[in-house]
Amino acid sequence: MGRGFSRSLGCINSFTAELWGFRDGLMLRNSLQLTAVDIQLDAIAIVQLLSKPSDANLAVMPLLEDCRQLISHMDQVWIRHCYHEANSSSDCLARIGTAQDNNFISYHDPPVDLMEFLSSNKAGLYYSRTIADFPLPS
């Protein structure tokens, strides 16, 4: 059973958008009553914030506290950082959200635009990160 969502957030920074997506994913997990969840975020700052409960970002504190509260009710949860290139399905849904008129859409079946990314993810494929070579000063 595959489920997903997209949300229109308007003009916000990428950190806050990632945190909204994380919270929405946790809410979806609750509605599906999943007992074990492996969460992979490409926003390492969120992973670090969650691992250090004393750290605070006042601008997103209510959203972060929602996430912490939702996590506290999970039996088994793993939260890890992954590279942006390995998170293409989530990025596709985020792009869909930027163009949608509705505030929130829950998907029981994947949107057509997502199918290519799901096939690649299922096959274990992702685009590797390339680092440009810059000449060192002599």
Image (spheres, rainbow, N blue to C red):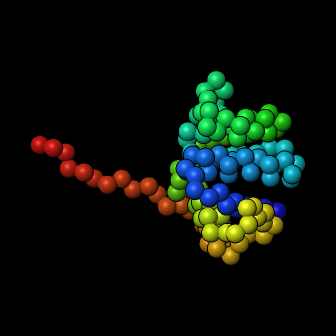
For the point 78% across and 35% down, the residue is: 69
How many dots with numbers? 0
Compare residues 77 and 113 and report the one nearer the observer. 113
Quarter holding residue 71: top right
For the point 72% across and 46% down, the residue is: 23
Q: Position of residue 40 (x, y in %)?
A: 64, 47
Would you place residue 18 above or below residue 101 in this image?
above
Is 9 placed left or right of 136 in the picture?
Answer: right
Farthest-out residue, left: 138
Is 134 placed left or right of 46 in the picture?
Answer: left
Compare residues 40 and 10 and report the one nearer the observer. 10
Q: Where is residue 50 in the image (x, y as percent from the top left)?
A: 65, 34
For the point 78% across and 70% down, the residue is: 109
For the point 55% across and 50% down, the residue is: 13
Tell me the quadrant of the picture where the C terminus can be found: top left
Q: Where is residue 77 in the image (x, y as percent from the top left)?
A: 75, 39
Would you place residue 134 above or below residue 5 in this image?
above
Q: Position of residue 25 (x, y in %)?
A: 74, 51
Quarter holding residue 96: bottom right
- Note whether residue 44 is visible: yes
Compare residues 57 and 31 and report the one nearer the observer. 57
Compare residues 71 and 13 and report the one nearer the observer. 13
Is 43 placed left or right of 108 in the picture?
Answer: left
Farthest-out residue, top: 54
Tell me the quadrant of the picture where the N terminus can be found: bottom right
- Note whether residue 123 is visible: no
